[in-house]
Amino acid sequence: MTAILDPQPAQTSSLALRHALTMQPDGRRVVIKLFLPGEDAQSGRNRVSSLIDRILQLDEDEIARLLDDVLTRFAGRHHDLLTTFAHHFDLVHHRVPPDIELSPNARSLIGAYFSHEFAVEAAALCNPSMVPHPDQGGLQPGQLRVAVSLRQIGEGHISSIGFCSAVVGPGERIELEEREGPLMVGERTGAKHQRDLLAAGLAEHEIETELSATVLSSLPERYSDEEFEEILGHLPGELLARPTTGETLAVMREIVAADYAVAFPVTVPLHQRVLWPAAPAESNGMEDARFVQVLEEDGRMSYAATYTAYDGRHIGGRMLQTRDMRHFEVTALRGPAAQNKGMALFPRPVHGRHLALCRSDGETLGLSERDESNRWQEAVPLLMPHRGWDLIQVGNCGSPVETRAGWLVLTHGVGPMRRYAIGAMLLDLDHPERVIADLPSGLLEPDEIEREGYVPNVVYSCGGLVHDGRFWLPYGASDVRVGFASISMEVLLGAMVPVA
């Protein structure tokens, strides 16, 4: 195991203990993506046909030489490069004249010309969350392997979700495991959609027609893309003739297509997996994933994460669900509380209530409950800006962590000069709408090094965990690097002030 150790005492400014371990953006971490000249430059002119015509002028010897050169330069940087070239060729093969028979080398070379590398974290690396890793093998007593999700920002400010692994404990020790090797974007697979989410999406679009009602009544609780299209293909002609049919069908297909699943081969380790935008709503980024280990209704543990989808103009809340960090199901979050950034799920139901932290008004931390229709309802205010260091806005820094003293919630506040600091509060275990204690000062504030970066004067986290009596907090510093802090739970809880 290659590891980066935390070899020296941590820094002690702020209440939490900073560890002498940071992660910097690494421009060598690249994925391979489809490249469509002209379209990618938003010129409005498709140049695929003219490029293919020029490639077809090459003889077989030149084709073989060029392909060999590409493989020599790039094969070690990617998983199964020829398979990717074959896939990208398939996406443009209709531009090849039908009377031309191409050699395998020519097909691969065409695929290479329609491929490019994207450095996923060339611009910034920030806003991590931390959960227990699915693999706890090979550890010593007192150690816990954790999976750390990362917001990676590359060219064009496009964000994706990456991962790394670390080992915390015993005591204040932390080590970062190997992060080398080629990256892979998950392969989109058939999703099992949820009928209640389709109904919630239609309600948000204010669509309630006989056609939509007929489709909803015909769908099972969980359905595939093929089952959905089969039902649309057998709708009565009288409903299809209605003047609202076109709009209704278009919205329904848009809602269904926005939910998807991606999977990775079991041979690709977690730190090489990249969740890349795969729906129009998130085409400009998947931001600030808040992962949490959750208790399912059948008693099994799994993982869920909420994140912000951004299409360049609009934001929307979305959720990832996975049992193994290898196969992920992606769905939209619906309801009034899901219309802004920063939802964070509770790790288990509270007396049958499915709860989440949110900031639906943009400046107040609130508590929302999911109703029977899978819609997140208007939030109950928990924390309003009220101190000098958080008067602009407050929000969460990840999912609540269950302790015997209450639900521990890491918060963030924004003060003068848009300076971010991390705080904390406790919610009642049985009635989380009640704040029982609060940290009067910051838990972690940007120091003189952390204040410099892509977005200055910011420390921000998307979630931490408790292990062996310590709270472990990964955090982004000025949207350019990731640091790690920890604090004794006894010290943290002792610094809390009861709320009357």
Image (cartoon, rainbow, N blue to C red):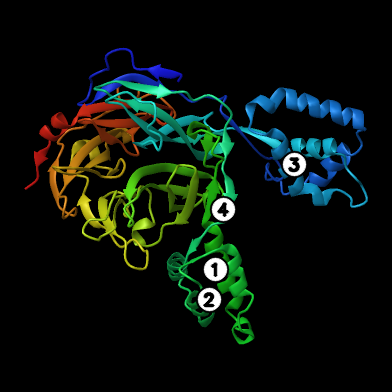
Which mark is first along the chain, 4 or 2? 2
Q: Left or right: where does residue 391 sit relative to residue 296?
A: left
Distance (Cα) linking label 2 and label 1: 10 Å
For label 4, count other residues whose C-alpha is less than 10 Å away and answer few (under 14), some (14-19) or many (20+).
some
Distance (Cα) linking label 3 and label 4: 24 Å
Considering only vertical position in the picture, is 65 above or below 85? above
The percent coordinates of residue 188 (x first, y second) are 58, 49
According to the image, label 2 marks what residue? Answer: 215
* Amino acid beneath label 2: Val
* Amino acid beneath label 4: Pro
Considering only vertical position in the picture, is 335 above or below 114? below
Distance (Cα) linking label 2 and label 3: 38 Å
Which residue is depicted at the point 80% across and 48% down? 93
Residues at badges 2 and 1 in contact (C-beta under 8 Å)? yes
According to the image, label 3 marks what residue? Answer: 86
The percent coordinates of residue 274 (x first, y second) are 53, 38
Which residue is depicted at the point 27% across and 36% down? 415
Residues at badges 1 and 3 in contact (C-beta under 8 Å)? no
Numbered mark located on residue 413 in the image = none
Q: Is residue 38 visible?
A: no
Distance (Cα) linking label 2 and label 4: 24 Å
The quadrant in which residue 234 appears is bottom right
According to the image, label 1 marks what residue? Answer: 252
Secondary element type, mark 2: helix
Q: Residue furthest bottom?
A: 238
Q: Is residue 108 visible?
A: yes
